[in-house]
Image: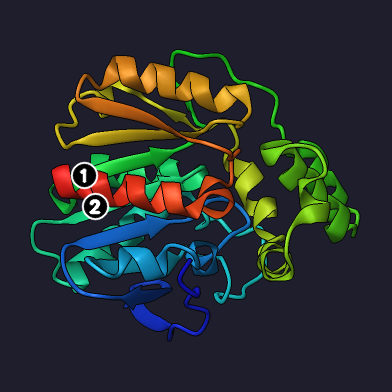
Amino acid sequence: MPAPHTELPHHVLPLPDGTLHYTQAGDGEPILLIHGSLCDDRYWRWQYPALSEMHRVIAPSLRGCWPDAQAHPRADYAIDRHAADLAQLLRAMDTRGGAHVVGHSRGAHVALALAIQAPELCRSLTLADPGFRFTDEPETPVFYADAVQRLQAGDAEGAVELFIDTVNGPDTWRKMVGWFKDMVRDNAATLLSQIKEANLPVDPQDAAPLTCPVLLVGGAQSPARYGTRQDRLQQLLPQARRTRIALAAHGMNLANPRSFNRTILEFATTA
C-alpha cells in the first residue's frame, strides 16, 4: 500500500462569515471528500495517494472542525451551512462540470445537501453509510446522547470512546491507532453542536429529483441502521448503484482502503 500523505499543506478559503480549511492533491476530474463526525481532512489519509494518481482530490475540514478551533456549541455547525461552504469552495476552485462528491456518515448528509442545493456542482454522488432519517419517519433516540453527557461532564475520553464504539462496534476505540485517536480528540467538542440538529431529516421530495449518478456504499460489518438508509435511498433514486466494502464496518475507508479506493475510482470512471 502506498505511504499515506501526512503533511499535505492546508489551504484556507475566506468565507463571508469565517474560513474553510482544505487540502488538495493531484490533477484531473475533481473528487470532493467529505468527512463525518469527529473527523477532519486527516480522515482521508489512505485515500489521497490512490485517488490523486488520476484525480484532483479536495478534502475540506468542515466548518468548526480542526484546525478551525472555536468553542462549541456553535450555531453554524450545521448540515446546510456545511453544504453551502462546500459549494463556495467548488466554485472558487473553478471545478467546471462539478466534482465527484463523496460523503461518509454525517458527511453523506452534507454531500446529499450539497447535491440538492447545487446539483450543477455534482458530477456524481457517493454516499457511504449515511445515517440520516427521512421526514416521513419518526424521530429516533439520539445514539450519541450519552457521549454528549459525558463530554459535558468533562469526560472527553469516555465520550469519544463511547461514540466510536457505537458507530463501528465494541472495543473499536481501544484498537485504533494513535493518529486516529488524536484526530477524534481534536474534534470531540463538535458533538456539543451536532446534537442540536439531531434527527434532522431529509425530505424525499428534495432528493428524488436528483439525476446525477449515485453510488451507495456500505461496510459489510456496519451496524444495520446504515443499511436501512441505503435501502430507502435505493428505492428513492432509481439510478443508484449499491456496493459493500468487505472486511470493514463503518470506518470502511480505513479498514479496507484498497477496496474503498478501487470502488471510488471505478465509479468516477463510469459515472
* Residue at (81% x, 44% y) in the render: 162
Q: Give the vertical position of 59 relative to 79 (above or below).
A: below
Which residue lies at the image location 55% right of the left edge and 74% below the top edge? Answer: 68
Q: Nearer the viewer, residue 190 or 72?
A: 190
Residues at marks 1 and 2 touching, judged by CB atoms closer than 8 Å: yes
The three-letter code of the residue at mark 2 reads: His
Give the secondary structure at mark 1. Answer: strand
Is residue 152 found left or right of 109 in the rendered image? right
Q: Residues within 10 Å of mark 2 (few under 14, many from 20)?
A: many
State which quadrant residue 12 falls in. bottom left
**Residue 52 on image: x %, y %:** 30, 69
Q: Amino acid at mark 1?
A: Ser
Q: Residue furthest left?
A: 96
Q: How is the image coloured?
A: rainbow
Q: CA distance from mark 1 to mark 2?
A: 5 Å
Quadrant of the image occupied by residue 54: bottom left
- Badge 1 or badge 2: first in the primary sequence: 2
What residue is shown at x 48% (from left), y 63% (from top)? 44
Residue behind mark 1: 124
Q: Quick check: 201 left or right of 138?
A: left
**Quick check: can you spot residue 252?**
yes
Q: Is residue 92 above or below residue 90?
A: below
Residue at image mark 2? 100
Pick whichever, 257 or 7, lies toward us: 257
Which residue is found at the position 40% from the left and 68% from the top?
48
Residue 174 picture location, percent across and down: 83, 54
SS of the residue under disc 2: strand
Mark 1 is surrounded, within 10 Å at the Cα level, by few (under 14), some (14 to 19) or many (20 or more) other residues, namely: many
Where is the C terminus found, in terms of image quarters? Answer: top left
Number of numbered callouts drawn: 2
Taking the view exactly as shown, the residue that stands out farthest to the front is 1
Pick whichever, 229 or 208, lies toward us: 229
